[in-house]
Amino acid sequence: MSGKLRLAVFVSGGGTNLQSIIDSCHQESYPAEIAVVVSNKSKAYGLQRAEQAGIPTEIVAHKDFNSRQEHETEIIRRLEKHSVDLVVLAGYMRVVTDVLLKRFFNHARKLPGVINIHPADTRAYQGAHGYEYAMGQLEQHPERLAQTKITVHFVDSGVDTGPIVRQVPVPIEAGDTLDDLRARGLKVEHQLYPEVIRLYAEGRLMLNDNVVTIIVGAV
Ligand code: GAR
């Protein structure tokens, strides 16, 4: 083994965040590697990105199971052979349960073992369609914001309620379309997620009373 943090990246769709992590892992000095890519959708383009990069894939369709817990139990069974240290949700459009969270809790580091990226401030908006929310395009949220905040957070058993690791604001300009904002936001996502994975791998993250501290300097 290389001593690098071994990731399982979970995707349901296009996988541009997965691609940014693949690209980061290609740098020799990057402290993590992708052990496996998991999808609940057999047609997810992210699976093709993984195959192109020579990364093993596991497809576990949620439709084949009666409950989220049974679905995750099968995912865990499939992951055993890949020696995974951290689960990285990257456009994985399923709510996860304690079954997955408990299995991957990192007891040595006293840190959750599942992280997620979200295109909005998780304190203000949870769930799918974060860019539409920020643009004021959801029926329940008709107000357009001045900015969105890309958020990486630890996953807990709520929907986008876990402790925030890092947030980066992305301005919404006059005249922006949804596609403009998404393109600008994804650029930030693709930088931020590999950075946070690096912080985790280097042992720079601490969690106390649900608040994340980032250790700067020697660890
Ligand atoms: C990303 O914008 C990610 O933040 C979002 O899905 C997109 C996946 O894109 N995730 C969520 O909304 C989670 N609540 P990708 O498949 O191209 O990485």
Image (spheres, rainbow, N blue to C red):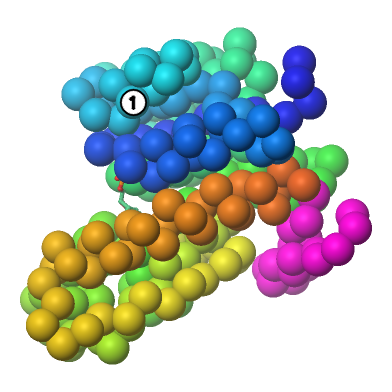
Magenta-span inclusion, residue 205: yes
Location of residue 107 (image quadrant): top right
Q: Give left or right: position of 127 versus 81.
A: left
Asked whether 52 or 27 is in front, the reply is 27
Q: Residue at x 69, y 53 (%)?
A: 199
In the image, residue 54 above or below residue 138: above
In the image, residue 135 above or below residue 214: below
Magenta-span inclusion, residue 81: no
Q: Position of residue 159 (x, y in %)?
A: 41, 59
Q: Circle 1 is placed at which residue position?
A: 49
| Residue 121 shows up from this direction | no
Location of residue 178 (image quadrant): bottom left
In the image, residue 61 above or below residue 17: above
Q: Give left or right: position of 64 versus 195.
A: left
**Residue type marked 1:** Arg
Q: Residue at x 57, y 22 (%)?
A: 35
Q: Give left or right: position of 159 versus 164.
A: left
Q: Residue at x 22, y 69 (%)?
A: 181
Asked whether 81 or 65 is in front, the reply is 81
Which stretch is magenta? 203-219
Asked whether 182 or 91 is in front, the reply is 182
Asked whether 52 or 93 is in front, the reply is 52
Residue farthest top in this picture = 81
Q: Residue at x 25, y 38 (%)?
A: 14
| Residue 79 shows up from this direction | yes
Q: Position of residue 146 (x, y in %)?
A: 28, 88
In the image, residue 174 above or below residue 120: below
Which secondary structure, mark 1?
Answer: helix
Residue farthest right in this picture = 218
Q: Position of residue 29 (x, y in %)?
A: 70, 36
